[in-house]
């Protein structure tokens, strides 16, 4: 017979409340955001080269076919940090697996 989950540790309750609060904040921000019409770039704009020049700090030699890349650069760095954290977490979990099952 299956039993319902029980709250064994009060510290997990606080973590759950924080997670629900974070979800509520993110839902409110997402639902309250206004999305304007799509804005395109010029046909000869090179986005990849612009991001590369911005990463290296060489925007003064980038040329005329560049676009404002601060938004792209911030998203690129945030995604890189998240992927790095996921990779380190997977290595940590893989190294724990070699030690045995339940801390044996």
Image (cartoon, rainbow, N blue to C red):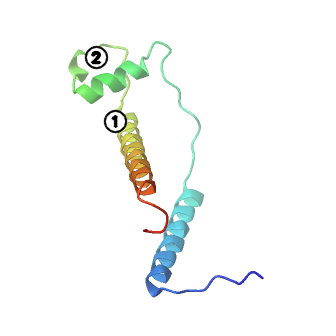
Marked residue nearer the N-terminal end (2 or 1):
2
Q: In the rendered image of this protein, does residue 83 appear above or below residue 98?
A: above
Tell me the element at label 1.
helix
Tell me the element at label 2.
loop
Query: Crowding at label 1, few (<14), some or many (≥20) Cα neighbours within 10 Å?
Result: few
Q: Residue placed at 48% from the left, 85% from the top?
A: 9
Q: For the residues labelled 2 and 1, say whether their Cβ atoms are less than 8 Å apart.
A: no
Q: In this view of the protein, which residue sits in the foreground, 96 or 34? A: 96
Q: Residue placed at 36% from the left, 29% from the top?
A: 68
Left of 20 or right of it: where is 44? Answer: left
Q: Position of residue 33 (x, y in %)?
A: 54, 54
- For residue 3, the mark is none
Q: Which residue is mark 2?
A: 62
Q: Quadrant of the N terminus?
A: bottom right
Residue 66 figure quarter? top left
Q: In the rendered image of this protein, does residue 86 appear above or below residue 71?
A: below
Q: Position of residue 19 (x, y in %)?
A: 50, 71
Q: Which residue is mark 1?
A: 70
Q: Residue placed at 46% from the left, 12% from the top?
A: 44
Q: In this view of the protein, which residue sits in the foreground, 95 or 15? A: 95
Q: In the rendered image of this protein, does residue 23 appear above or below residue 12?
A: above
Residue 104 figure quarter? bottom left
């Amino acid at each position: 017979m299956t039993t319902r989950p029980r709250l064994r540790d009060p510290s997990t309750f606080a973590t759950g409340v924080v997670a629900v609060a974070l979800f509520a904040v993110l839902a409110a921000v997402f639902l309250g955001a206004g999305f304007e019409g799509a804005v395109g770039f010029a046909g000869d704009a090179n986005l990849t080269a612009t991001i590369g020049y911005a990463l290296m700090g060489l925007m003064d030699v980038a040329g005329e076919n560049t676009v404002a890349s601060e938004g792209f650069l911030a998203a690129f760095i945030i995604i890189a940090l998240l992927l790095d954290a996921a990779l380190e977490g997977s290595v940590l979990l893989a190294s724990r697996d070699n030690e045995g099952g339940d801390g044996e």
